[in-house]
Image (tube, rainbow, N blue to C red):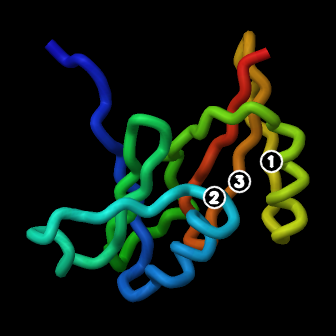
Amino acid sequence: MITGIHHVQITIPKGEEATARAFYCGVLGLIEIEKPESLQGRGGFWLQVGDQSVHVGTEDGVDRLTTKAHVAYTVTDLAEWGRKLEAEGIERLEGIPIPGFDRFEFRDPFGNRVEMIQAI
């Protein structure tokens, strides 16, 4: 039986951890958590998101702009997130409406699709 989701992973190009930290920790305000010692040499880093985690791994040769794969972050003030991201020069993309939710999408500095979603 599956009982939940332990983590999700996104990827960034190798060597881009500083840019990714600036975005995910600085702009989005997520908290970096320590990776197990056995995985530290592989690049990337981990983030705490509520009681889940997002693993930011590294890999080259991926066209992130062509995928629908994404993480959807639940937020409490979607409008404020829209303003904050636009102030950072990040373009909001309107998604297909989902009953009971307001949402928008954007691409992170590496092309990963990201969604912000709020229950209404």
**Measuring 79% from the left and 15% from the top, which residue is drawn there?**
120
Q: Name the residue under label 3.
A: 106
**Measuring 43% from the left and 72% from the top, which residue is drawn there?**
12
**Number of other residues with Cα within 10 Å of mark 1, as a class: few under 14, some 14 to 19, many 20 or more:** some
Assign a secondary structure to mark 2.
Answer: loop
Q: Where is residue 118, by image quadrant?
A: top right
Dots 2 and 1: beta carbons under 8 Å? no
> Which mark identifies residue 29?
2
For marks 2 and 3, the one nearer the N-term is 2
> Which mark identifies residue 81?
1
- Disc 3 residue type? Phe
Residue 104 percent coordinates (x, y): 76, 40
Assign a secondary structure to mark 1.
Answer: helix
- Camera-nearest residue between 73 and 105: 73
In the image, is residue 84 above or below residue 119? below
| Residue 7 placement, left or right of 36 | right
| Distance of label 2 from label 1 (alpha carbons) | 11 Å
